[in-house]
Amino acid sequence: MEKSFYGYYLEALGINPRDKPALQSALKRAVETRCFEIELYWKRATYFWAFQAIAGGALSLLFKDGNIISPALLPIPCIIGIISALAALLTAKGSKFWQENWEMHVDMLENALNERVTQVILWKDDVQFSVSRVNEDLIKFVLYGWSIGLVISLANLFPFRFCPSYAWLLSDVNIPLVMLYILIPVIALFRLRSLKTKLSGHIIRSGNHGWQEYTEKKKNQAHTMLWRNPPCERVATQNGERPHTRE
């Protein structure tokens, strides 16, 4: 019989599928490491937001009574903001990778022990927002903001033919700029509202009988239980039967 991905997984760990103590020990370590990775994720995020505060403070020091003290220094805080925002974004993605790695370990080992606490999710009304996805998109908006600031500061230092200086941005009535200020928050609002937690699997709602395949588009006001798909295995339901976790 051909070995499954799950079988290769236990072989890579060097654990006998029938060795329950070894599986329990591995599961405990996976859970602890996952919690540690989540803690590191937010510590790293705080570290890079400190750089954003420094860049913002440096930018404010270059203004006095509404005027720029030294236009030549204006790009510097923008560059610091761009570099730190980009580093924060890449670090957040890297941290998420390792967090998901240990979540997969927990899922696989729970399957081996027939313990599926982390694979069964309960909620009411609708799935809520993904904290990590919201954080990543917020960093992206900060990165875009610093990039726009850098372009404006460079345009002031090296005037283009059709943009002699940044002064046009400070005019009393600037329709394009006003539209941009309105458009950016609207885009951010719609984007952030779409960052729901991504789930896959089968659900059963209170008042219903039998498992159904989960779809993100269907909302409900009832208590819902979702059984996430086991890693690298397809879950199938027929005639409302209980989904199988392994073939």
Image (cartoon, rainbow, N blue to C red):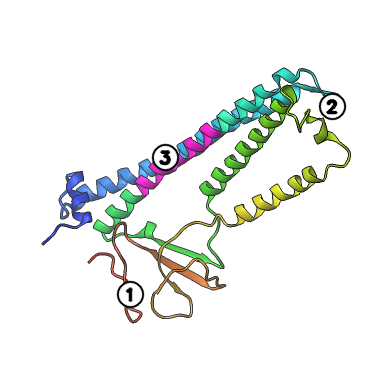
> What element does badge 1 sit on?
loop
For the residue marked with disc 3, what is the amino acid?
Glu
Residue bearing mark 2: 66
- In this rendering, the answer to whether 195 lies above or below 67 is below
> Which mark, by number, is residue 37?
3
For the residue marked with disc 2, what is the amino acid?
Gly
> Which mark, by number, is residue 17?
none
Residue depicted at x 71% and y 25%: 59
Q: Earlier in the sequence, mark 3 or mark 1?
A: 3
Between circles 3 and 1, the one closer to the viewer is 1
Q: Residues within 10 Å of mark 2 (few under 14, many from 20)?
A: few
Where's residue 102, x and y in %? Answer: 35, 45
Between circles 3 and 2, the one closer to the viewer is 2
Where's residue 121, x and y in %? Answer: 44, 62
Identity of the residue furthest to the right in this view = 172
Which residues lie in the magenta part? 86-103
The front one of 95 and 75 is 75
Residue depicted at x 52% and y 38%: 89
State how far apart marks 2 and 1 are (Cα): 66 Å
> What element does badge 3 sit on?
helix
Taking 18 as reference, is 102 left or right? right
Q: Earlier in the sequence, mark 3 or mark 2?
A: 3
Taking 120 as reference, is 175 left or right? right
Identity of the residue furthest to the left in this view = 1
- In this rendering, the answer to whether 70 lies above or below 107 is above
Q: Please tell me whether residue 94 belongs to the stretch shown in magenta.
A: yes
Residue bearing mark 1: 237
- In this rendering, the answer to whether 225 lies above or below 155 is below
Where's residue 144, x and y in %? Answer: 62, 38
The front one of 57 and 143 is 143
Q: Do residues under tags 3 and 2 come within 8 Å of each other at their CB atoms?
A: no
Taking 87 as reference, is 21 left or right? left
